[in-house]
Amino acid sequence: MFSFNMFEPHVGRVFQNRFSTQYRCYSVSMLAGPNDRSDVEKGGKIIMPPSALDQLSRLNITYPMLFKLTNKNSDRMTHCGVLEFVADEGICYLPHWMMQNLLLEEGGLVQVESVNLMVATYSKFQPQSPDFLDITNPKAVLENALRNFACLTTGDVIAINYNEKIYELRVMETKPDKAVSIIECDMNVDFDAPLGYKEPERHMQRPEEPTEEETDPSNYEMDIGFRAFTGSGNRLDGKKKGIEPSPAPLDPSDIKRGIPNYDFKIGRITFIRNSRQQPRKTEPVSEIMEQIIFRGLNKSTFLHSQI
C-alpha cells in the first residue's frame, strides 16, 4: 500500500548539502557577447551557468558564495567567488591568472565545490617584479584591487591592474587559515621583498688625506685689511696735485700662512694655547743674594720693633 520510493527524494536532499560539479573552463576572452568583460580579469571571481544558480538556491548554503576549484590532473586547487550566472551550460569562465595557477588549458575540466571560509585577519604578498616598487603607495593600490576579489589562497599568484600595467603578487601567507575570505574584513597587509630585488651596495667613503703642494705666494688672495692713509685727500688751495693715494706695496712675506696640523684625527679637536714656547727668565746670582740679605734685615728690624 505504501511505497518506499516516496522517501527517496527527501533522502537525496539530505546528502546533497554541498554543491559539487565539473565544468569545462575557458578564459574570459572566449566569452561570447558584445560587451567587454575585461573586468573579470581584474579580480578573483568566475562566471558560471544558470543551472548552477538553480542548484545553489535549493541548497542550504551560506552567503557570500565561495567555491573551491580543483584540477585533479595536476592536484592544484584555489578558491574564488562568483560574479554572474550567464555562462553556457557545462562551461565556466575563469580569469587567466587563475587558469595559470591551476595549470589548466582551454576546455580543461575543473571541479567546483561550495565551501565556507574564515574571515581574513592578515596576509603577506611578494611582488614578482621589482617594478612594483615604482608605485608610490602600494598598500592603497592593493587595497583597491582586492575589492574585486572574494578570497585568497596561500601559494596563489594573483594579478592586479594599475596604470594600464599588470603586476603579479604571490600570496605568501594568510591568517587564520591557508584559504580565507576577504569580503567585509579588517585585514593587515604586509609585503615581502620583490622577486629578484637586490639591495643597493653602500660604499664607505674614506676621507682623502690632504697633500701639501708648493704654491706661489703671489697666488694668495690678499686680505689687506686696514691700511692707514690709503684714501684720497683735498688740498686747502683747491689744487688736485699730489692728492692721489700712494699706498706702500704689500710684500709677499707679510702674508702669513697657517701651519697645518698633520696629527689631525676625525672627531678630535685640539686647542693650541701657545704655539711658541717662551724662554724661561733667569735672574743673576747677585740679585738673588741681595734678596736673601734683605730678607734677614727685614726680619731683624721687625724683631727690634717688637722689643
Image (cartoon, grey):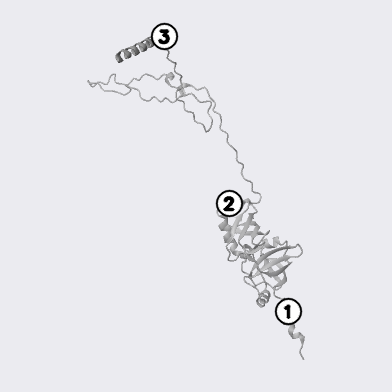
For badge 1, the amino acid type reads: Gly
287 above or below 170?
above
Q: Residue furthest left?
A: 237
Q: Closer to the N terminus: mark 3 or mark 2? A: 2
Mark 2 and mark 1 in contact (Cβ < 8 Å)? no
Q: Which residue is mark 1?
A: 12
Between marks 3 and 2 in the image, the one whose residue lies nearer the viewer? 3
Residue 165: image x %, image y %? 61, 56
Which residue is painted at 39% across and 9% down in the image? 289
Q: Is residue 117 visible?
A: yes
Residue 163: image x %, image y %? 57, 57
Q: How many marks?
A: 3
Quadrant location, the C terminus? top left
Gap in angstroms between the C-alphas marked 1 and 2: 56 Å
Q: Residue furthest top?
A: 286
Residue 4: image x %, image y %? 77, 85
Helix, strand or loop at mark 2:
helix
83 above or below 165?
below
Q: Nearer the viewer, residue 128 or 174?
A: 174
Residue 269: image x %, image y %? 49, 30
Q: Closer to the N terminus: mark 1 or mark 2? A: 1
For badge 3, the amino acid type reads: Val
Residue 135 placement, left or right of 273? right
- The quadrant holding residue 74 is bottom right
Q: Nearer the viewer, residue 187 or 161?
A: 187
Q: Which residue is mark 3?
A: 285
Q: Which residue is mark 2?
A: 134
Quadrant location, the N terminus? bottom right
Helix, strand or loop at mark 1:
helix
- The quadrant holding residue 72 is bottom right
